[in-house]
Amino acid sequence: MDPPPATPANNNNPNAPAPAQPQAQDAQRRTGSVSGVLLFATLWFIFGATRNEDVLSRHQLSDSLQSLIYQQGNYSAFLKNETSNFTLIEYDHHLIPLMSHIVPPPTFRPGFGPAFYSNVTGFVNGDLSFFNLTIIPEEPLASLVEPLMRDWNYTEAAPRIGDWDWHQGRKVQFSVLENKPNNNATINMLHGKMDVKDETAGRTIVFTLEGLHFAQNGSFFGFAEAKGRHPDLRQLPALLPKSERNRTGQVIDIELTQRIDRLRTMIASGNTPEHDLEDTVVTSCPFVFHAQLRPAHATQGQMNLLEEEMEKPTGVSTIRRPPLLLDAVFVSPECGILLHMSGGKGLKSQHYWRKTTTFAGVGALAYMLLLVFTVREIARCNTHAMLSRVGRTTLLLQTCMDAFSFTAHLTFAIVADNKVSMPLICTGFLACMLLFFESQFNNSAWEVQSPERSAVAPPAAPTLTAPAQTTTEPVPRTGIAQGRAWANFTRIGDTLHRVATFLRDFYGLIWLIGGFIFVVWVLLDALTALSWLVRFAHFLFWVPQIVRNARRNTRMSLSWEYVLVVSVVRLFFAMYIFRCPENVIGHDLAPWAAYLPLGFALQLAVLFMQDRLGPSFFLPRSWNTADTYDYHPIIPQPDPEAPEQSLGDCAICMEPIIVPPPDSGAAAVLVKQSILPGATVKRPYALAPCHHLFHTQCLERWMDIKNICPQCRRPLPPM
């Protein structure tokens, strides 16, 4: 017979802890094992996935290296007239004359004409003109276009054209890099990209550029392929006369060899490039392009000295930098498209980075100025009376602007990754410090102003009821269930009542509706929504402070030096980004930004008049719902024959209170101020509700610290 199970020693103790159940232990073990699996999966996703991407990138680079070695071997054999698998494609003989007709090449011999920039590494911006080659133009282009498009087939061209609207894509930006494969100073290799922007649809298409730059006459020839498709360098000599093909072929062969060496170094070091996982190709039209620099009004020796000084500054005096202007034509016979750019403005990379460094330095000084004045203002507004008169929405706008500025400067520095990165990081660091102090300022104002909308209703008077008779009858279960349901219903009703109270509040309703509209707008069109958000943030910068002054019937506590410095600095950044035609960000001119100075001036004028005429000077008296007290009533003037023309001594500064005579200019100003419907006449004296008299300025400075009378310690209403 089996022995009975052992009984725990504390079985009779009701306070003893219950023994652990086997099911609970199994559940804990299962939970621990699941947590371990999740932790392992997370770590593998973070580290293993990245490692797999690196392995995949290395395989792709290895494949690219093998393909490039194969291409270079065949091309080198072709140049030596040996057997190879490479064939030079001959283009239609009408193509080059068509491009030369639209962008004429120089007619002088190299070395006997005007000078050009020998290296255009940098950026070029311009406007494109679209021409449909399937519609035969008038002479003299008809004789060139008609034979070129004779075999054009729309069925084959439609998939290549894709869904891109060539009539709307008018803005173009080139980012190019030139290098010399050898010591030959007459031919440079050009690589880069071309961004064509459709501003109506908010779309951008990217093309990869590969070409040749003949430095002596400023001519360019090359290919442009849609992103993801790489032009074949070996076919570039086909765009040139046969007399130039051997020389350019040798340059291209050296370039291919150098690219092979760079790929090998990249694979050996493990530095795999980041792949852009972006978008689908919207068009696959291949383009052949010809571009021509406009000559500079200088000799070639002067231009060479200028470019050497821009590359490695030594302080040598040079000529003034001539403008870099470029004309270009892009032709796609397969798609029947011709694009023409006239007078594109270029900016060399050395000059661009110098401008970026200057911008970062000026931005650092501006943020340092903001930081100093913000810290001083925080130290000045350190009382509840002053913090209660600060517009928190204005501080929030500044915080958002500086958060965006910090992110933008840091991103710019990481992407640049050169000598301008440090100045940009310094400017971003100052923006981050300013963001920290502004958040502290906003949080202090929030702690003081948050009780304004959370006023507690007075408790209801107790109701006298007869004492309930006690009963010993048990409460039925249905009654308990009904009581719980009623409690839940009451809880829901209280929640709905609080929501309704919040919606009845003016600011709560505005923020709720505005936030919902903005979120929907961002989901539908993020760029347009953010553009309008920037406009509102600048045009309504001081409006929250103006509204708070009028709503609370108080003058702002911010000092005018802080207000002016903040306004000037914020306006400077906005005008540079949106109105400077050659800003380093590359933002197009915004017509609305031309009215920003007027908007800031109007807001500052309203703040000044609120300070002089009263917070609600622009509102009818019936609209002013706040309890107001007139600190400047009309009181009897001192006797003109009295030896001292004063109303007494101020209890704060202990100086006499002098009132201007009725026939003085100051009295006339007071009369003009009183004409406005909502204005309060600001006189030299201030009479408190407790009938104590002070200088107006003395009492204002006192009330910045305490809202009590300096003499009797009674509470004072806002001034």
Image (cartoon, rainbow, N blue to C red):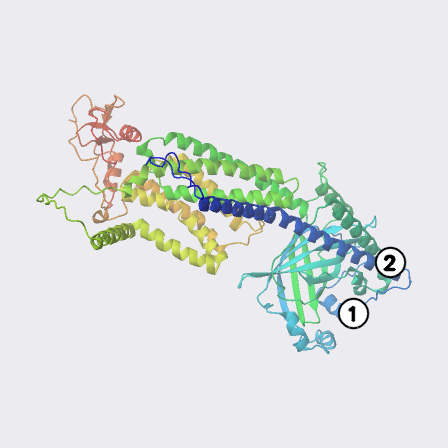
286 to 154, vertically: above or below: above
Residue drawn where x is 71% and y is 56% of the image = 294
Please state which amino acid type lies under the numbered disc 2.
Ser
| Distance CA(mark 1)–CA(mark 2) | 22 Å
x, y (%) of residue 67? 79, 58
Q: Is residue 270 visible?
A: yes
Q: Residue furthest left?
A: 466
x, y (%) of residue 27? 47, 47
Nearer the observer, 85 or 144: 85
x, y (%) of residue 574? 49, 47
| SS under mark 2 | helix
Nearer the observer, 298 or 612: 612
Residue drawn where x is 23% and y is 23% of the image = 651
Instruction: Name the image quarter holding residue 132.
Output: bottom right
| SS under mark 1 | loop
x, y (%) of residue 137? 67, 75
Nearer the observer, 43 or 122: 43
326 to 5, vertically: above or below: below
52 relative position to 684: left or right: right
Label 2, on which residue?
A: 76
Q: Residue furthest front?
A: 1
- From the image, state whether disc 1 or disc 2 is nearer to you: 2
622 relative position to 333: left or right: left
Give the class, few, some or many, for how many residues have Cα within 10 Å of label 1's Cα (few <14, many ≥20).
Answer: few
Give the class, few, some or many, for how many residues have Cα within 10 Å of label 2's Cα (few <14, many ≥20).
Answer: many
Please state which amino acid type lies under the numbered disc 1.
Tyr
Q: Are marks 1 and 2 in contact (CB under 8 Å)?
A: no
Q: Is residue 571 visible?
A: no
In the picture, the quarter occupied by the C terminus is top left
Residue drawn where x is 31% and y is 43% of the image = 548
Residue 91 circle label? 1
